[in-house]
């Protein structure tokens, strides 16, 4: 009996331990809530966070511009290729965001409220167009490799983007004359929907291209590098658009999670870092390779 009692004590925690753990957890939650509220109410924290976002966007915009200039210097004889347009749009989108957060106080207090929504949503729409352009590029590669027609891909890209912008403009007009909670929910749900559509586009054509590259012979030149490139970019873009889709959908029904307000600087920082700054920076790094120089017709290498 004595042995049994000793063994049982080894497996029983005293009630005081549970109480101490509960008190410690409660204290930690209170401390985090206090920190969150202090940051939300501090104008210095707001300035620091929004200016940090401004600097991050400005850096990515500069990287895209430098890469665009390098590509133009490498192949000046080509016109506006998909690669050049992609870098130009990255420069514009991130530049607009940098200006937006650099003048955040005016942007968040502009009247009427619909103008505020337009200024905040327009770069997001341009971000959608920029990265669906990458989906178009991959779709063209996949169709050419499979000897499938490609003549309908570019018109489909312009039609889809045109429909998206048309619907968004109609929503902004509706919000101008009917600025209710339902109108804001409609705008955010539409934004969530197009983010989901972009993620699906990357899954479909990024996944198809990835599978096709895996079937190439192992000794194929550049196969492994292109495989990693497509796989990483697909994963990054799918993740960022899915995060945007979920966050915007939550914000549509829970105003405490709204990122388009001044009193959520930490949430703003985390959101824009995850869905725009880091994905753009990573994709630009992965796609940093320059096109090969065009050999002059007058140059004949020695054989």
Image (cartoon, rainbow, N blue to C red):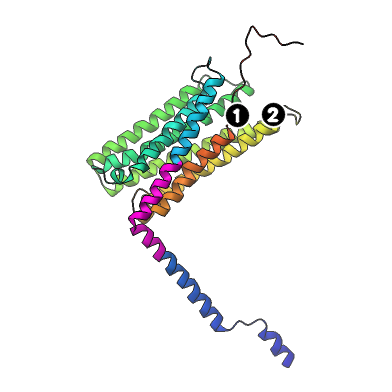
Image coordinates for residue 237, horizontal then vertical, percent: 53, 39
Residue 275 on the magenta segment = no
Q: Residue at x 36, y 36 (%)?
A: 122
Q: Residue at x 57, y 36 (%)?
A: 285
Q: Nearer the viewer, residue 26 or 168?
A: 26
**Vertical placement of residue 250 versus 34, above or below:** above
Image coordinates for residue 18, horizontal then vertical, percent: 54, 79
The residue to which callout 2 is attached is 222
**Principal secondary structure, stretch drawn in magenta:** helix
Query: Could one spot residue 118 in this view of the protein?
Result: yes
Query: Could one spot residue 133 in this view of the protein?
Result: no
The residue to which callout 1 is attached is 289
**Vertical placement of residue 70 versus 17, above or below:** above
Image coordinates for residue 4, horizontal then vertical, percent: 72, 88
Residue 55 on the magenta segment = yes
Q: Earlier in the sequence, mark 2 or mark 1?
A: 2
Residue segment shown in magenta: 34-56
Q: Quadrant of the N terminus?
A: bottom right
């Amino acid at each position: 009996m004595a042995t049994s009692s000793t063994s049982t004590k080894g497996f029983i925690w005293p009630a005081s331990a549970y109480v101490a753990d509960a008190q410690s957890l409660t204290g930690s939650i209170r401390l985090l809530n206090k920190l969150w509220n202090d940051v939300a109410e501090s104008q210095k924290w707001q300035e620091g966070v929004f200016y940090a976002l401004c600097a991050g966007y400005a850096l990515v915009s500069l990287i895209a511009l430098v890469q665009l200039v390098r590509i133009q210097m490498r192949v000046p004889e080509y016109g506006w290729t998909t690669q050049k347009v992609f870098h130009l749009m990255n420069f514009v989108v991130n530049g607009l965001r940098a200006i937006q957060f650099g003048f955040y106080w005016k942007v968040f207090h502009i009247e009427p409220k619909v103008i505020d929504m337009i200024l905040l949503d327009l770069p997001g729409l341009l971000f959608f167009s920029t990265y669906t352009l990458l989906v178009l590029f991959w779709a063209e590669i996949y169709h050419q490799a499979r000897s499938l027609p490609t003549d309908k891909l570019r018109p489909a890209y312009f039609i889809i983007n045109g429909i998206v912008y048309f619907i968004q403009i109609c929503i902004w007009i509706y919000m101008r004359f009917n600025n209710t909670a339902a109108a804001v929910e409609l705008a955010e749900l539409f934004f969530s929907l197009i983010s989901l559509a972009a993620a699906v586009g990357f899954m479909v054509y990024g996944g198809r291209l990835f599978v096709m590259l895996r079937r190439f012979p192992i000794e194929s030149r550049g196969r492994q590098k292109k495989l990693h490139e497509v796989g990483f970019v697909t994963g990054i873009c799918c993740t960022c658009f899915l995060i945007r889709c979920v966050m915007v959908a939550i914000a549509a029904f829970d105003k405490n999670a709204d990122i388009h307000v001044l009193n959520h600087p930490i949430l703003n920082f985390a959101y824009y870092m995850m869905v725009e700054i880091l994905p753009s920076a990573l994709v630009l790094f992965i796609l940093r390779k320059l096109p090969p120089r065009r050999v002059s017709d007058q140059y004949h290498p020695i054989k």
